[in-house]
Image (cartoon, coloured by chain):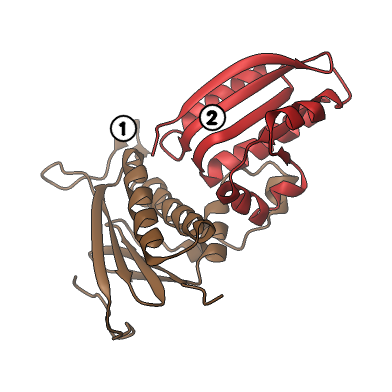
Amino acid sequence: MKELRITTEPTKAGGHAVQVVRVAGYIDAHSFPRFEQEMLALINQGSYRLLLDLREATYICSTALGLLMSVFRQVRHNAGDLVIAGMSDKIANIFNLLGFSKLIRAFSTEEEALQCLAMTEGQ
Amino acid sequence: MPGYDRGTMSTQRERRDLALVVPGETDYLYLIRDFVCAVARKMGFPDQRVGEIEIAVDEACANIIEHAYSKVPSAGRVIVARYPDGAMQAITLRVSVFSNRIELRILDQGPDFSISELGDLDLSAFTTGDRKRGMGTYIIRNFMDEVHHTYHPGVGNELTLVKYLSQA
């Protein structure tokens, strides 16, 4: 199982700046601090349109899922959004159990996720 | 193992036992996950069920590291649970493979701590409130068919997780 690698790259959707956070490997209790640091840095710098690319994510612990929900609330509070692309069936199963899928939108492809962010009203 | 109760265990044939012992540190959680996933897949659990077993075991072990083996600040000093010879306390994972189920026994050397002590979860605290932690117990209870806790005085906790192979 691969160690966590996180990369963030800017892009645009509908004229709005978007940060694409690419997660590869696992987010567990050991690697969670790095993931948390990355996500909070984006919030602190005012990036409120976030696309989380999970195509290469192999495992996400509940604490990381809880953080995602917290980040989601913060970006929505600032008229932004957090969407997910490429979530595996395994992770989606957990997402659904926790009821997060009712709030955080997930798409099969990055293109679909970006289209969603392009339509998000706000800054 | 002292105090280990075999009274309720099945005597079904074809049972296989495996075990893994790792230090009680988060660095080693990936080994535990890889181990249980490999066993569950070999048993024939479909991918989604393998994922459920994986997260249940990982969350249980992470709970042990955080609650049973946590570093406790005391008067400015950080106390790390260690044996007198300096060895780090361990997490033992014993896996019993039966024809119709997997039984995972997670043993630690910490104080009495049962996940049942973490009360029933209100998921709305996560979706609408500020709560970020505590979903692990909810996940364990929902993804595993049976969850049992036993505390062995002088030894530690034994958490047993059982999942049945579906006939469907």
Q: Nearer the viewer, mark 2 or mark 1?
A: 2
What residue is pinned by disc 1?
B77
Q: Residues within 10 Å of mark 2 (few under 14, many from 20)?
A: many
Q: In which quadrant of the rendered view does residue A18 lie?
A: top right
Q: Tell me if residue A45 can be seen.
A: no
Q: Is residue B115 left or right of residue B97?
A: right
Q: Colour of chain B?
A: brown
The residue at the point 33 percent across, 38 percent down is: B27
Q: Residue at x 23, y 65 (%)?
A: B154
How many marks can you see? Answer: 2
Vertical position of residue A47 compared to residue B144: above or below: above
Q: Is residue A49 above or below residue A30?
A: above
The x and y percentages for residue A50 are: 70, 25
**Chain in red (letter):** A
Q: Nearer the viewer, residue B148 or B66?
A: B148
Q: Is residue B3 visible in this depiction of the protein?
A: yes
* Secondary structure state at the residue bearing disc 1: strand
